[in-house]
Image (spheres, rainbow, N blue to C red):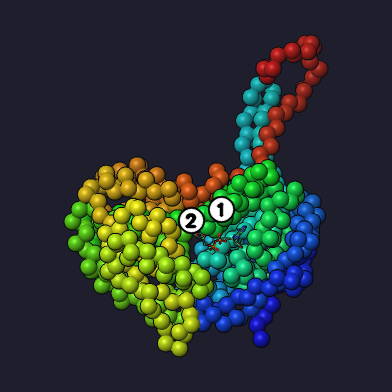
């Protein structure tokens, strides 16, 4: 019998009364391992009301006490690291080590939230006019909401609620319905860390639950991570309802390979960054642009990719796991077929891949196309599968022009031995996160996750100082204390003197 994943509403773990049931499956064989009853509108509204009530007292809790909840939480997450990674691996199919990485990158944000007091510090200037001082405070917004994707069920919820809550807000999390078990465990541990009732709420469901959050007047800010179409919808609807929104969306990340780069490093890095996690990473390198003679390395890259084999989450030899669902597999296979039909050269075809004993799983083997052009659907669309598209450019300038013409701007990297080439690339490229001889340049939490263009809608990004700005308002105070009675009459101008 499969287990029922619980909502966490008003400090209680509950089954939910919704009639719509969604199964959580093991992507290696598509057997049901758990299920959710989608939250009904009244249930989501109850979660929001409870979060609103909790905000009244949580915002008054001393900042160092809020930080202590985060200190206990990051400690608990570390204690339960393997357990969380096991749950995560079972519902996503990720290999155990990759699942541990997913959890770890989230723990790092919880660690950062322990430093909330200094992150909240405002600014002061004494004597802005005679005897007048100006200073600013950052204050929480109220109830914030997070809507998260399937591909990082630990890291991405942890990008959001620890910092939002440390800032003094309360939070409603609506994680992906495809892997809700990991978020449930994250929430249980948060309760165990001593977070007061109502500060964090968890509701499961799909579009219907999201729509309640998007339109509810008591939700002040929305953080979203997911696909482009849904991201645009969330941004437009949320801002239409006059909410603050940050929406992180899809990507198509290019890697530029200069002929002076270290060949073996390029090959090792490209293999992991293109097909790792079955290519289901928003920072996966899905396009390799070989400049000049670097194209001669394509056969060796193909050789290295062909040795990677997908497998079960607990198979130590597996390079990556299955795709999340049969629908995801079908989409990837359709794109591979389109790539062939549109004239790309398929050097490695993983369409017909299986794992013995798990034939019904969502397997796709490493796939590599050469001679890809910008008009092909495999170039234009985010494939979100283990598929690498290779292209050629005559010069660094041509490569930069190609990358800058992409509507996406999440991540990119350049492999080179030339400081001048790297400097030119980092300066001219219109992408928010750039790696120099680093394949997946996801910034640590003291920076922010800064996707650009069609990969992000909003202005303040995830975690780091930008997240603290996103989850707070600034209040600026101008103050004068009179030492003695002022003899002069009314000041009729706007100037401070
Ligand atoms: P998705 O857009 O299908 O789902 C994301 C969330 O939105 C889920 O919680 C889902 O329930 C909800 N949702 C789905 N359809 C909706 C609708 N019509 N209306 C309202 N809500 C809806 O994304 P996914 O497939 O879970 O995740 C993969 C996508 O996420 C990829 O495109 C990937 O690039 C992107 N992603 C981006 C980043 C980033 O930082 N830019 C990070 C991770 C993933």
Mark 1: give few (<14), some (14-19) or many (20+) Cα within 10 Å: many
Q: Nearer the viewer, residue 68 or 439?
A: 439
Residue at the image point whose x is 48% and y is 80% from the top? 361
Q: What secondary structure is found at the residue carrying circle 2?
A: loop
* Ligand 1's quadrant: bottom right
Q: Residue at x 74, y 12 (%)?
A: 492
From the Cβ of disc 1, is ligand 1 less than 8 Å away?
Answer: yes
In the image: residue 192, left or right of residue 109: right
Give the percent coordinates (x, y) of residue 97.
46, 74
Quadrant of the rendering where the N terminus is positioned: bottom right
Left or right: 363 in relation to 197: left
Q: Residue at x 65, y 63 (%)?
A: 206
Residue 357 pos. (x, y %): 45, 88
Q: Is residue 203 above or below residue 164?
A: below
Q: Are marks 1 and 2 in contact (CB under 8 Å)?
A: yes
Q: Position of residue 398 (x, y in %)?
A: 27, 46
Q: Determine which residue is flagged by label 1.
A: 231
Mark 2: few/some/many CA within 10 Å (<14, 14-19, 20+): many
Q: Quadrant of residue 90?
A: bottom right
Indicate the secondary structure of the residue bearing disc 1. Answer: helix
Label 2 CB less than 8 angstroms from ligand 1: yes
Q: Earlier in the sequence, mark 1 or mark 2?
A: 1
Residue 218: horizontal and vertical position, in percent?
Answer: 75, 50
Residue under label 2, please give it.
250
Image point (41%, 81%), residue name: 354
Seen in the image, is 210 located left or right of residue 449?
right
């Amino acid at each position: 019998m499969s287990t029922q994943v619980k909502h966490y509403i008003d400090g209680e773990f509950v089954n939910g009364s919704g009639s719509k049931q969604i199964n959580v499956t093991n992507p290696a064989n598509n057997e049901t391992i758990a299920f959710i009853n989608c939250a009904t509108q009244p249930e989501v509204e109850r979660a929001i009301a409870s979060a609103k009530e909790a905000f009244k007292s949580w915002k008054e809790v001393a900042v160092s006490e809020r930080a202590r909840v985060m200190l206990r939480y990051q400690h608990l997450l570390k204690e339960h690291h393997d357990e969380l990674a096991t749950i995560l691996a079972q519902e996503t199919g990720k290999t155990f080590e990759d699942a541990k990485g997913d959890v770890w990158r989230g723990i790092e944000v919880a660690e950062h939230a322990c430093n909330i007091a200094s992150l909240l510090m405002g600014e002061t200037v004494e004597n802005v006019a005679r005897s007048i001082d100006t200073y600013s405070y950052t204050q929480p917004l109220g109830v914030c909401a997070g809507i998260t994707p399937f591909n990082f069920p630990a890291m991405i919820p942890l990008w959001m609620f620890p910092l939002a809550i440390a800032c003094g807000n309360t939070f409603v999390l609506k994680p992906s319905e495809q892997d809700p078990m990991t978020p449930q465990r994250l929430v249980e541990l948060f309760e165990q860390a001593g977070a007061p009732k109502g500060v964090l709420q968890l509701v499961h469901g799909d579009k219907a639950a999201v729509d309640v959050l998007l339109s509810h007047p008591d939700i002040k800010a929305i953080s979203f991570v997911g696909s482009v179409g849904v991201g645009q919808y969330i941004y437009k609807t949320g801002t239409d309802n006059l909410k603050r929104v940050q929406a992180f969306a899809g990507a198509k990340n290019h890697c530029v390979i200069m002929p002076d780069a270290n060949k073996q490093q390029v090959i090792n890095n490209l293999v992991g960054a293109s097909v790792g996690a079955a290519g289901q990473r928003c920072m996966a390198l899905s396009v390799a642009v070989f400049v000049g003679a670097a194209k001669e390395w394509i056969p060796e890259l193909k050789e290295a990719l062909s040795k990677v084999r997908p497998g079960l989450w607990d198979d130590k030899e597996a390079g990556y796991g299955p795709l999340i669902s049969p629908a995801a597999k079908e989409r990837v296979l359709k794109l591979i077929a389109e790539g062939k039909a549109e004239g790309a050269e398929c050097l490695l075809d993983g369409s017909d891949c299986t794992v013995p004993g798990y034939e019904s799983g969502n397997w796709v083997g490493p796939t590599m196309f050469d001679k890809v052009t910008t008009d092909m659907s495999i170039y234009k669309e985010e494939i979100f599968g283990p598929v690498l598209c290779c292209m050629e450019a005559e010069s660094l300038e041509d490569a930069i022009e190609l990358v800058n013409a992409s509507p996406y701007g999440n991540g990119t990297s350049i492999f080179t031995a030339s400081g001048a080439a790297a400097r030119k690339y980092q300066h001219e490229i219109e992408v928010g996160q750039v790696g120099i001889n680093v394949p997946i340049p996801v910034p640590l939490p003291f920076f922010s996750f800064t996707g650009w263009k069609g990969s992000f809608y909003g202005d303040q990004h995830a975690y780091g100082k930008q997240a603290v700005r996103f989850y707070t308002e600034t209040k600026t105070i101008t103050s004068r204390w009179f030492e003695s009675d002022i003899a002069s009459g009314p000041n009729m101008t706007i100037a401070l003197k």
